[in-house]
Every structure is written in C-alpha cells, then in structure tokens.
Image (cartoon, rainbow, N blue to C red):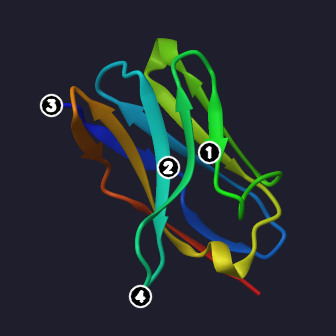
Amino acid sequence: QVQLVESGGGLVQAGGSLRLSCAASENTYNMAWYRQAPGNERELVAQIILGGTTNYADSVKGRFTISRDSAKNTAFLQMNSLKPEDTAVYYCNTVRRGVAYWGQGTQVTVSS
C-alpha cells in the first residue's frame, strides 16, 4: 500500500505563489495532483510520469508546474499567479497495480 503525505498549502493573496509537496512511501510510475472545491467534483490539475512527461489542466497551464524528485519519492506542484478560483483542497494521487492512492489533502485558499 502506497502512503502519500501532502504539505505546503495555506492562505495566499491573488497573484501569489505556493509550493505543494507530496512524499510517497515508495517510488511510483506516475504522480498527480487533483483538487476539489466545495460543491465541485474532484478534478485533475497536473500529472507527471517517471520519464518526466507532464500533463496539465487547461485552467492552470502556464501558471502551475509539476515536478518530481524520484530519488526522494516526492512530487511538487509550484503554483504561481494564483487566482481565487484556485481555492480548493489539493490531493496527491498515484496509481499502482490498478489501485488509486490518495493523500489526506491540503487546503489552498486564495483571497481576492
């Protein structure tokens, strides 16, 4: 079973930046960040696979950057130019042998 622990959320003003971290208990092929705002479904924000290929939601392209340190089994989400609509709980995710694993989530709040 893979354990994921997120950190780095908080309160920031619009236009500011935050960096989220996700520490995994073991190395995995892919890591991703999702977010869920109140009343909304959980949505994919960004994902990265072991070779470095990345994928982003259109709403965050050019503002967010996902990266990973495979040696430390850690993924990062650098969030710049934050907007109030980025406010959500952000979850780290990985899939291993067809099973999805989730972190506990970290709150990101962007004030206008």
Percent from the top left, x then y, of residue 98? 22, 33
Q: Which residue is mark 3?
A: 1
Can you say which quadrant of the picture contains the C terminus?
bottom right
Q: Earlier in the sequence, mark 2 or mark 1?
A: 2
Type of the residue with mark 2:
Trp
Q: Earlier in the sequence, mark 1 or mark 4?
A: 4
As helix, strand or loop, the secondary structure at mark 2 comes to strand
Bin the neighbour count of mark 2 within 10 Å (Cα to Cα): few under 14, some 14-19, many 20 and up. Answer: many
Q: Position of residue 30 (x, y in %)?
A: 44, 29
| Distance from Cα at disc 4 to Cα at disc 2 | 19 Å
Residue 91 occupies quadrant: bottom left
Which of the two discs, 4 and 3, labels the residue nearer the N terminus?
A: 3
**Up-down relation of residue 4 to residue 63 (above or below):** above
Residue at the location (44% across, 81% down)?
A: 40
Above or below, 68 relative to 95: above
Q: Nearer the viewer, residue 34 or 97?
A: 97
Q: Which residue is mark 4?
A: 39
Q: CA distance from mark 1 to mark 3?
A: 23 Å
Amino acid type of the residue that numbered disc 1 sits on in the rendered structure? Leu
| Relative to 59, 88 lies left or right | left
Q: Are marks 2 and 1 in contact (CB under 8 Å)?
A: yes
- Badge 4 local density, few (<14 within 10 Å), some, or many (20+)? few
- CA gap, disc 3 to disc 2? 19 Å
Labels 4 and 2: the sequence-earlier one: 2
- Residue 33: assigned label: 2
Give the mark, 1 or 3, whose residue is nearer the N terminus. Answer: 3
- How many C-alpha atoms fall within 10 Å of the one at disc 1: few (<14), some, or many (≥20)? many
